[in-house]
Structures are given as structure tokens and as C-alpha cells.
Image (cartoon, helix red, strand yellow):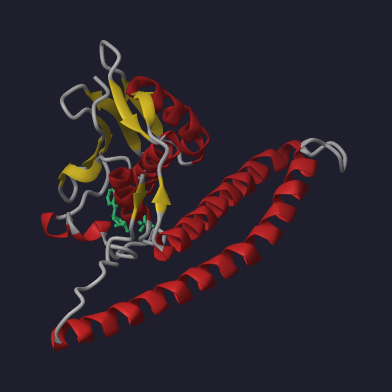
């Protein structure tokens, strides 16, 4: 399935108003192409030094330059975590370039949602340890099967976990659960800072960020929503309020 970029609808073909629309559409397309080339350029320029840094870090950790003193373990782990974050940012930029150029391919298969949350919790563990956070899973009593692109779904859940850790307060707590309803859903819950009702829709806008001290791009939830829709599903806030934490909900078509 191919999903077009959300704000790129071709206009009609007759009448003055439509000619103006066609002009604006052509301009928007040209801007999108320019943005896509720009993002591709940045990704290309960032990838090379990041690969070198990751290579040297591996060599330091496996003792190629001699046994690392005990006191280095913490800093090396921290550098590894930060490199992982930067690589994720570069992946986001690459995806942004793809979205700008208008297509998100999805390879749809049947997924066991219990496996999806278990794997996501394992992937999040290293980051959780760095932030002294807890990630829990609450698997459903029986298997819940859904349809989706496994890479997209993993990416969406990873991003929701990262947000729950980033905006989770001093000792973040995250719970991943599965709603066996129709459509089935993955729920990502935290006890963090929460989001006021007036912003529940806007946080899915591209590059929108709430003013806070956490570094970020404002891109993750937008990408998450586009990827969820490419799978035939949706990404939304189930509930969130300032000081009361949040629950994000990824619904996918049922495979039943
Ligand atoms: P980023 O985290 O890079 O800013 P996102 O698109 O993932 O980008 O999130 C947009 C904004 O939504 C964030 O800046 C943050 O203010 C808010 N947000 C996202 N997830 C949460 C959450 N779990 N708890 C509180 N606020 C959140």
C-alpha cells in the first residue's frame, strides 16, 4: 500500500480559482522536493561521522585499545545511548524526506500484539536503565492478532516509549498493554507531565512541540500517525491531562 503525503492533494482542473489552486499546488510540490533534497543531504552528511564514532566506540568497548578502566564503563554506556538517540534522529530525518517526496510503502502482515509489546519492552530496556525508569508489559490473556507493517509498528511503539521516558518525570514508569477490542490496540501509558486537552490534536502536527526542556524535533508523533495510517490504523491520545500522565493508543486492523 502507498500512502500520499497528507497535505498534497491535486486540485481540480477547470476555472480561475482552480488555476490559482494549481499554481499553489505546483509551488507546494516544488517546496516539498526542495525540503526532501535538503533532508537527504543532511542525513547523508550526518551518517558518515556517526558511523565512524560508532566504530570507535565498539573498538573502545571490546578492548582493542587496551582494557578500559572500570570508571569508563558508565561514560561509555552514556555515549552509546546518545549515539543511538542521534541515529534515531537521522532515521527520522530520512523518513521526513520520504514523507516530503510523497510515499510511505507498507508491507502488511499478521502480527501478534503480545510479541510486539514484549520486543518493544526489551528494546527500551537499555534506555530505561539510563533514565532509572521502569517499563512494564501487561500482556492480554490470549493472543490478539492484528494487521500491520512490523517495521512501522515497532517504530511507532519505540517512539511512544521514548516519549513516555522523556516526558515521564523524575523516575519514569511506562506500561505497554494490548486492548483485545475491535479494532485491537496497543496502549502506551505513563505517569508523566501529561498534555492539556487543547493540545491533544496539535501534538500530532509536523514539528509541533510543547515548550519544555527536553530536546526533540516535534516529528515523532506526526510520523507515528502517518505510519499508523499507512497500516490502515490510527494513532491517538486515549487520555492525557497535565500532572496525570498519558495513554497513547495505536489501533490496527484486526486479523481475526
Ligand atoms: P518531540 O518529542 O521530539 O518533541 P513528538 O512529536 O514525539 O516530538 O511530541 C510532540 C510533543 O508532544 C512533545 O514536544 C511533548 O511536549 C508532547 N508529548 C509527546 N509525548 C508525550 C508524553 N508521553 N507525555 C507528555 N507530553 C508528550
Q: Where is residue 155 in the image (x, y as percent from the top left)?
A: 42, 42
Q: How many labels does the image show?
A: 0
Position of residue 112 relative to residue 81, above or below, is above
* Residue farthest to the top, as pictured: 141
Q: Position of residue 131 (x, y in %)?
A: 46, 41
Is residue 218 visible from the viewing direction of this image? yes
Question: Residue visible at 43% across and 64% down?
Answer: 101
Question: Residue visible at 22% across and 49% down?
Answer: 194
Position of residue 121 relative to residue 59, above or below, is above
Quarter of the picture holding the C terminus? top left
Q: Where is residue 45 in the image (x, y as percent from the top left)?
A: 65, 66
Q: Quadrant of residue 252?
A: top left
In screen coordinates, is 254 left or right of 61? Answer: left
In screen coordinates, is 187 left or right of 32? Answer: left
Q: Where is residue 96 in the image (x, y as percent from the top left)?
A: 44, 60
* Quadrant observed for ligand 1 in the rendered image: bottom left
* Residue farthest to the front, as pictured: 14
* Residue farthest to the left, as pictured: 197
Quarter of the picture holding the N terminus? top left
Position of residue 31 relative to residue 86, above or below, is below
Is residue 168 visible from the viewing direction of this image? no
Question: Residue visible at 38% across and 34% down?
Answer: 108
Position of residue 131 relative to residue 93, above or below, is above
Amino acid at each position: 500500500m502507498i500512502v500520499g503525503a497528507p497535505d498534497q492533494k491535486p486540485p481540480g482542473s477547470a476555472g480561475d480559482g482552480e488555476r490559482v489552486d494549481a499554481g499553489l499546488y505546483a509551488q507546494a510540490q516544488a517546496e516539498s522536493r526542495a525540503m526532501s533534497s535538503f533532508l537527504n543531504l543532511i542525513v547523508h552528511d550526518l551518517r558518515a561521522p556517526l558511523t565512524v564514532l560508532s566504530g570507535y566506540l565498539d573498538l573502545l568497548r571490546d578492548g582493542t585499545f587496551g582494557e578500559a578502566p572500570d570508571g569508563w564503563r558508565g561514560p561509555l554506556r552514556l555515549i552509546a545511548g546518545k549515539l543511538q538517540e542521534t541515529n534515531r534522529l537521522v532515521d527520522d530525518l530520512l523518513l521526513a524526506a520520504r514523507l516530503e517526496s510523497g510515499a510511505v510503502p507498507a508491507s502488511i502482515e499478521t502480527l501478534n500484539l503480545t510479541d510486539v509489546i514484549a520486543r518493544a519492552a526489551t528494546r527500551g530496556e537499555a534506555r530505561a536503565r539510563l533514565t532509572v525508569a521502569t517499563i512494564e508489559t501487561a500482556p492480554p490473556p490470549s493472543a490478539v492478532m492484528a494487521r500491520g507493517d512490523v517495521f512501522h509498528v515497532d517504530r511507532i511503539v519505540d517512539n511512544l516509549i521514548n516519549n513516555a521516558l522523556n516526558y515521564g518525570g523524575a523516575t519514569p514508569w511506562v506500561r505497554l498493554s494490548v486492548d483485545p477490542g475491535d479494532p485491537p490496540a496497543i496502549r502506551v501509558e505513563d505517569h508523566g507531565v501529561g498534555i492539556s486537552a487543547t493540545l491533544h490534536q496539535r501534538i500530532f502536527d509536523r514539528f509541533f512541540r510543547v515548550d519544555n526542556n527536553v530536546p526533540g524535533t516535534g516529528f515523532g508523533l506526526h510520523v507515528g500517525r502517518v505510519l499508523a495510517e499507512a497500516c490502515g490504523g490510527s494513532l491517538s491520545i486515549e487520555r492525557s491531562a497535565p500532572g496525570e500522565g498519558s495513554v497513547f493508543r495505536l489501533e490496527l486492523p484486526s486479523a481475526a
